[in-house]
Structure formats: structure tokens, C-alpha cells
Amino acid sequence: MDKQADQNFQSLKWGITQLHNTDIEKAAYFGLNYNYQKGHFRQAQQAEKSSSASFATEGVSTIDRFKLYGYFSFARTWQDSLAFSQKGIEDNYTPYYFIAGKAGTFERQKYLGGGLISYNLLKDKLFIGTGIDYLYNSSARSVDPRSLVTTYKIVFSPEIALKLKKSTIGLGIIAGYGDEKIEVGYKNDNYGGSQLYPDRISYLNFGYGFLEINTTNFIRRNTYTGLKLNYSGKFSDWNMNGKLSYLVSKEVNQLVKDNSINDQDFGTYQLETYKINLVLNKRINKTNHQVSIEASQNTGDDNLVRLNARNYTLKVADVSLSYSHFKPQFNNNAVAWFAKANYKDFYQKDAAASHTLQYSYINPQIGGTIYWNKLKGDFLSTELSVGARVPINSDVIVPTTQINIFTRGVAYPDYLYWSSNVGELQFLVNYTTEKLINKFRTGVSFKSTYFRNLGTPTSNLDATFIPGKNYFDFNLALNLYF
């Protein structure tokens, strides 16, 4: 599957509108994957070294008037030298989580499953169906203070779609719930709250730097509600898939009381997400052109019970634009060219701790893929891309009277990381053959990404961690295609 075809396959997962409009009747794959990451050029709440092993499967099937898409994956991750974060889901925007200055090892397990089921109610005219997405994640830290975090989430997205001439329009709702149980404690009681071991002290973070020494377990209860609008069809001679969605994620955080029937609310948080996805394809003079656009805006704020007021504010805007140019050659080698540009603007503020971090950057990339077609039925592609992350602005604001362990260990290092000029080099090799396993196509892929800090890793800030020069990401995969 070439790069453009893969992008089109990804878009059919957006909803039953795209699923029913695709020409794919049946397809499936099973894959094994190994990933290794290491480097000192990283964020403060990121592991120095990480490795993971996973397997995944997904597929599309058509049965009479039903069309189905399903997926399942399992991943186990081992992390070393991770400090100042004991989150269960690392990329979660929640402001409430435990931290400790002592770096430790983590083991994580993640299960993902779900898909789409659609029924053609009126032949080639009206479609109904739903999507379902399930997540279970566990995270355990094996260094005092130790944590165990288990996360559960399930989201349903029923949808109805109507086909009008060459276009299909779908409207759906999003509804889901989940919970997260967070436990923290000590195997060695001598570490608990002792000033002799300041990096072992367990803090509960109420935002971005407002801390309290705490080892009380708590539960996070989540609800998800939203709307989505899907489109698939022709738009001004372009084949287009589009999705517009609005999602409200609410969480209630409750301290677990051993001698009480009811848990105690200590903070709520609401995140609103607007997101748009577009993929456009057009063929001109035997050349395939593809444009992909993705944009999102996240706005979050909390209500901290002890202050009876809002403490934490988050604003994030992301925009990604890509273009690819590909002229297939069945008897000769073919070359595809692509260009990307990503823009991000990030702002977060903790009012009680008077901590503010903001940054924005642009990340342009260019690259090319060679498809080697003279291989007696086998498929080989090689890809090379280069990019850069160029900061537009960055700032960290902390009054001298408010500097604490979080300031030195997280806020200052994060500022140094996001204000750095970064070079990026990526290389990908993909080989597919039918000679290894009879009646199945077997694919092996290797992907390597290298990030380099183009500046000098020094600082006048009182930071306990300074991002270094290099970060390396290596990925190896084995896939079976059905």
C-alpha cells in the first residue's frame, strides 16, 4: 500500500459515512511491532529510555447490506528514568496527578479495541450504524513512591448517513464514560514524607505547579459527549473525505475515604475539543495529488474545591497541512514527493502557583518515497524525509517567591525544550513478499527517526534537568496481509 492509499484507508475509520463510500470490500492485516526510544533531548516528564512490544489487527468486511470495520491492539511498554509524572495515560491533558522528583521505572499495558458497524437501510441511499471504541490501560511504577493506575474508557458514536448523488453526508453523536483509579504508596516507610529524601516525597499536582504532599488514593470519573458531521464524495472535481467533530470531556476527581461511604470531590475539569479532518484526492495526467488537512483546538479549565475557583487553564491549537505527488509506474520505479507543515500554539496557567508556560512553533518537513517495481512480484519502498522544528515564541513566567520543585524539575526544563531549534531526519524501508508464507503477503518494515537540538544545551535558569542534544526513535514491524 503506497502512502496516499494508506492515508485514504485511515480516513474510512472516521465513521460509517466514509466506510460505506470506500471501494474496499474486504481487507485485513495482523502485525507485530517493536519500538525503542532513547535520548537526553526530551521533556522533563518523558522517559530517558523506552521500549515497547505490541501486536495489532484490523480489517474491513462486507456481508450483504452490512459493512464492518474492526480493530484490536495490545502493547506492553517498559520505561526507565521517568520523573515528575505518575499519569496512567501520558498524553492526557488532566491537571490532577501525582508527581515525585525521583526518577523511576514504569511498566504499562494498553488494550485498544472497537470498530464500526453499518447497515444499508435503503439500498445505496440511507445508512445507519455506530462506532465503538474501548480502552483499558494499566501503569505501575516500581520505585518509591510507587503508583498503580488503571484506566477504563468506552465511547459510542451512532451515526446516520444519507447519500445524495455523488456525496454522502452523515450526522452522529458521541457518548461515553470511563474511570481511572490512582493508587500511590511506599514499600519503604522511611521515604514517606521524609525531608531526608526530598525527591521521594509524593506530591499531588493540582494544575501546573500547585502542589500538596499527599498519598491519598483517588478516582477520576469521566464522561464524554459530542457531535460529529461526516462527508464523503466529490467536491469541485476532488474526491474528499471530511470530518468535523465537537467533544466535551468532563472529569470529577474524588479522594477515596476509607471510613466513609461517599468519596470526597476535590476537583473537576472540563476539556472542549473542536477538530476538523480533510483528505482530498485528484488524478491529473496520470498523477495522483493528495492534500490532507487536520486542525484542532482544545480549551480546558478546572474548578478546584479548596479554592472554590478556577485554578488551571489550558489552550492548545494544532494545524497540520500535507501535500503529496505520486505518478504510479507499473513497470518502472516510481517516486512520490511530499511536503508537510505543522503548527502548534500552547498555553497553560496555574493561578494558585503563578506558573505560566506558553510556546508556539512551526514544523516543516519534505521527503520522498521510491517504489521499486522490478522485483519479480515483491514490493519494496524506501523513504527519506528531513524537517525542522522552529520556535516562534516561548515563555515561562514564575515569580521568584513561587519557585518550587515543580518549577525547577518541570516548568524550566519544558521551556528550554520548546524554545530549542530542532532538526529531524527520518528513514523508512518497507518490503512485502508472497514467498515467505503461502497465500499471504508478508511485510517487514524498519523506521528510524533522529532528533537533534541545534542549539547549545545550557541555561541560566535554576533547572534540575537540561534537555540534551539527541533523541532517537527506532521501529521494527512484521505484518501479514489478508
Image: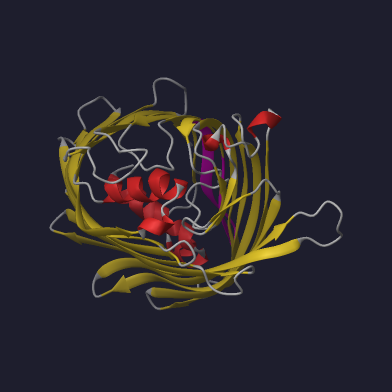
Q: Identify the image quadrant of residue 238.
A: bottom left
Prevalent SS, magenta region: strand
Q: Is residue 245 above or below residue 403?
A: below
Quarter of the figure with residue 233: bottom left
How many numbered discs?
0
For residue 259, say whether it is visible.
yes
Residue 69 location in percent, x, y? 54, 53
Q: Position of residue 244 (x, y in %)?
A: 42, 72
Where is 431 relative to 91, above or below? above
Residue 406, magenta (yes or no): no
Image coordinates for residue 372, horizontal then vertical, percent: 20, 32
Q: Nearer the viewer, residue 404 or 451?
A: 404
User: Which range is magenta?
Assistant: 53-73
Residue 303 lies left or right of residue 346; in this view the side is right
Residue at (35, 38) in percent of width and height: 465
- Residue 212, above or below 189: below
Residue 140 rendering spot, x and y as whole percentages: 62, 35
Residue at 34% in and 39% down: 42
User: Is 451 on the left or on the right of 439, as rendered?
Assistant: left
Q: On the picture, is 51 further left or further right than 137?
A: left
Residue 126 visible (yes or no): no
Q: Nearer the viewer, residue 407 or 476?
A: 407
